[in-house]
């Protein structure tokens, strides 16, 4: 299959790092077009190459290649760090955030020494994650099947916040890490940066995102339930 994405070269990543190191508008303006062509454009092409699969997974996906990709120039307002430029870039594949705030999403990101992709469900109010826990208990087999699908996709489970007490003491042990989680991520990380410089990465991501579809379906159903219950409301 012919893809728009041809890769992100080591030279482009090095220039991105130099831009961050210099943290200078004159340096950025001098190399703006190189950064755009070497970093921003390939990431937008990645969105285009994944769009048909992502629309098939969820026809409410909002996949504007311009809006989906992070900017090299950082917004430093209200941020302790005043560094103006990034050395890491990402793209989120999700529903329109104003109509469906906090919806689960697939993602891709890279840093100077690694890249990764996966599936994430974070909430501004971790207590709302109880809906996910309720759904796990309602249909544990469905959830474990989705976890196994993520493992088959090459994703590992992680969580940044856990409940300190066991809120489901009678639940099977296999479910305990998930029932204690206040957020969930299923992700893959790689330190072989040469793989970033090849369109084969698109095939790799398409396969992984498709295999992990049962977990995305589980998450999006939980999100829709949260919206129906008024726990999450569209932004004005």
Image (spheres, rainbow, N blue to C red):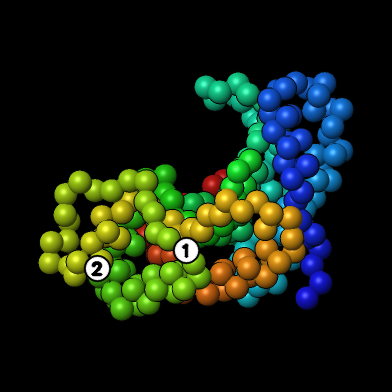
Identified at 72% across, 22% down, the residue is 22
Q: Considering only vertical position in the picture, is 32 above or below 141?
A: above
| Residue 17 figure quarter | top right
| Residue 16 figure quarter | top right
- The x and y percentages for residue 203 are 67, 70
Q: Residues within 10 Å of mark 1 (few under 14, many from 20)?
A: many
| Residue 121 figure quarter | bottom left
Identified at 45% across, 69% down, the residue is 150
- The x and y percentages for residue 169 are 13, 61
- The x and y percentages for residue 224 are 45, 64
On the image, numbered disc 2 is attached to which residue? 174
- The x and y percentages for residue 76 are 61, 25
SS at circle 2 = helix
On the image, numbered disc 1 is attached to which residue? 155
Q: Residues within 10 Å of mark 2 (few under 14, many from 20)?
A: few
Mark closer to the chain start, 2 or 1: 1
């Amino acid at each position: 299959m012919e893809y728009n994405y041809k890769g992100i070269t080591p030279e482009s990543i090095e220039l991105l790092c130099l831009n961050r190191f210099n943290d200078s508008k004159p340096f950025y303006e001098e190399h703006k077009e190189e950064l755009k062509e070497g970093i921003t454009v390939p990431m937008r092409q990645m969105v285009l190459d994944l769009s048909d699969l992502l629309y098939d997974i969820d026809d409410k996906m909002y996949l504007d290649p311009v809006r989906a990709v992070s900017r090299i120039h950082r917004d430093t307002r209200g941020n302790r760090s005043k560094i103006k430029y990034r050395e890491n870039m990402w793209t989120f594949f999700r529903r329109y955030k104003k109509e469906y705030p906090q919806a689960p999403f697939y993602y891709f990101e890279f840093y100077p020494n690694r890249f990764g992709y996966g599936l994430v469900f974070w909430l501004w109010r971790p207590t709302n994650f109880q809906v996910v826990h309720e759904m796990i208990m309602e249909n544990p087999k469905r959830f474990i099947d989705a976890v196994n699908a993520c493992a088959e996709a090459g994703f590992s489970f992680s969580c940044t916040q856990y409940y300190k007490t066991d809120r489901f003491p009678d639940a099977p042990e296999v479910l305990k890490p998930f029932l204690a989680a206040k957020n969930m991520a299923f992700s893959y990380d790689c330190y072989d940066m040469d793989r970033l410089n090849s369109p084969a990465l698109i095939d790799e991501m398409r396969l992984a995102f498709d295999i992990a579809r049962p977990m995305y379906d589980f998450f999006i159903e939980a999100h829709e339930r949260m919206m129906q219950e008024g726990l999450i409301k569209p932004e004005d």
